[in-house]
Image (cartoon, helix red, strand yellow):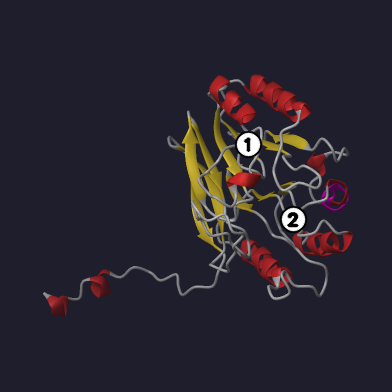
Amino acid sequence: MFLAQISDMHFRSHGRKLYDFIDVNACNAEVVSQLNALEERPDAVIITGDIVNCGLASEYQVARRTLSNLHYPLYIIPGNHDDKAQFLESMGPLCPLLGTDPQNMHYAVDDFDMRLLFIDTSVPGESKGWLTLETLSWLEAQLEQGGDKPTAVFMHHPPMKLGSAQMDRIACENGDQLLALIERFPSLCRVFCGHTHRLIFTQYRQAIITTIPGTVHQVPYYHENPAPYYNLEPAACLMHRLVDNTGLVSYLHPLSQYPGPYLYDANISCPVDEK
């Protein structure tokens, strides 16, 4: 299993820029091209929410056109910037596993040696997240059915506070319900989220909980200052690979332009004339 996870694309309508100066549509189109050009090709691409910025049909038109150019299967969940109905209408054809009910979007992928469970934490009109009783019941049933098979959950909002003054206020408000499932089911060993526009990771019992950067703009991590800052530090995605005798290994893959790669040469690294 080899997966690419991106998040928080925040597409705008055709010709519009995010905050009137960030060309997220062009940047996201470049991200798609970068993923298509990967030498080691993932089995699928995962997007953990906030496909668009304002939940507009015109934004989803741009998002669908751009994301349809990805040369991989696509697994998607909505975020707090998404409109559930518009999201499902636009993204459903790209990810049929989403189903047909915009109020109950969740699905399982059993194609790999690790189970992948996708759940919706978005609340209409709210920035914070919430796990509905239906979602929690579905998740509990999936974990019971999965037995000892290692399992990862993908959701938009992190289920616990991560020490970020800005983002902790809009995390998943009842994320403790997910933490209780982690306690009950040792197979649940990974929780991957978006929302924070930053790589942050922690651990709860056996589960590593991780948020990832956005594809274009990021959110600084301040523990004391809750002001809503954002910046344009380099974007990145996470790659997840199952490694024999090790398990799931995740690593940061940059989405910005940079020199290289270069082949290591010992003669240059330790030149003879320095001895």
Res 99 quadrant in image: top right
Q: What residue is rendered at 66% in x and 67% in y?
A: 33
Residue type at mark 1? Answer: Val
Residue type at mark 2? Answer: Ile
Q: What residue is rendered at 49% in x and 73% in y?
A: 258
Is-magenta flag for residue 237?
no
**Residues drawn in magenta:** 87-93
Quadrant placement of the N terminus:
top right
Is-magenta flag for residue 92?
yes
Q: Residues within 10 Å of mark 2 (few under 14, many from 20)?
A: many
- Residue 158 in percent (x, y) is at 61, 42
- Which SS class for mark 1? strand
Give whichever of 266, 10 is nearer the camera: 10
Residue placed under numbered mark 1 in the picture:
153
Q: Report the label total.
A: 2
Q: Is residue 99 above or below residue 268?
A: above
Q: Is residue 123 above or below residue 174?
A: below
Res 150 quadrant in image: top right
Res. 72 visible in picture: yes
- Residue 60 in percent (x, y) is at 83, 59
Residue placed under numbered mark 2 in the picture:
51
Q: Is residue 185 above or below residue 59?
A: above
